[in-house]
């Protein structure tokens, strides 16, 4: 887990992202909002939110301070410096496939 200083630094860096990147990152990682819900709120398609998310991650990946905090960026799903700040538990292990009706 990051220190309070690192936590504040991450938030400051995210706060300096351009809109709507800042909004998407804040809602998705810090508030646990899905891309679909963000899209509905902003009035964009889910695909556009995904594109904005990827743009924001590209900006964040290139941030030298975040690279130092994280010890080097590998892949966004392993990026603990941001993902550990989520206000929700990691539910990736609870994802189940929809059963086919038959």
Image (spheres, rainbow, N blue to C red):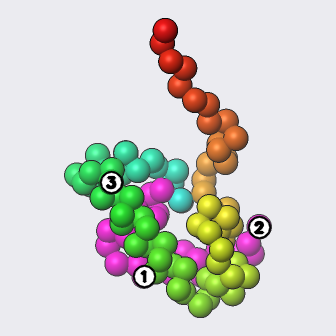
- Disc 1 vs disc 3: Cβ atoms closer than 8 Å? no
Q: State the residue in front, 36 or 76.
A: 76
Residue position for label 2 = 1
Tell me if mark 2 has few (under 14), some (14-19) or many (20+) residues whose alpha carbon lies within 10 angstroms of its own. few
* Percent position of residue 23, x then y: 38, 65
Q: Say whether disc 2 or disc 1 marks the residue closer to the N-terminus.
A: 2
Q: Nearer the viewer, mark 2 or mark 3?
A: 3
Q: Residue at x 40, y 72 (%)?
A: 55
Q: Which residues are magenta?
A: 1-28
What separation in Å lies between label 2 and label 1 (alpha carbons)? 23 Å
What separation in Å lies between label 1 and label 3 (alpha carbons)? 23 Å
Q: Which quadrant: the N terminus?
A: bottom right
Q: Say whether disc 2 or disc 3 marks the residue closer to the N-terminus.
A: 2
Of helix, strand and loop, which mostly describes the magenta segment?
A: helix
Q: Residue at x 36, y 66 (%)?
A: 52
Q: Say whether disc 1 or disc 3 marks the residue closer to the N-terminus.
A: 1
Q: Secondary structure at mark 3?
A: helix
Q: State the residue in front, 90 or 47.
A: 47
Disc on res. 47 = 3
* Percent position of residue 81, x then y: 66, 71
Q: State the residue in front, 21 or 97.
A: 97
- Disc 2 vs disc 1: Cβ atoms closer than 8 Å? no
Q: Secondary structure at mark 2?
A: loop
């Amino acid at each position: 887990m990051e220190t309070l200083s690192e936590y504040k630094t991450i938030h400051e860096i995210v706060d300096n992202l351009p809109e709507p990147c800042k909004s998407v990152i804040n809602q998705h990682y810090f508030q646990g909002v899905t891309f679909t819900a963000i899209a509905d709120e902003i009035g964009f398609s889910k695909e556009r939110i995904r594109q904005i998310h990827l743009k924001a991650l590209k900006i964040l990946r290139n941030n030298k301070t975040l690279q130092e905090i994280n010890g080097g960026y590998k892949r966004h799903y392993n990026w603990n410096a941001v993902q550990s700040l989520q206000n929700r538990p990691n539910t990736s292990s609870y994802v189940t496939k929809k059963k086919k009706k038959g």
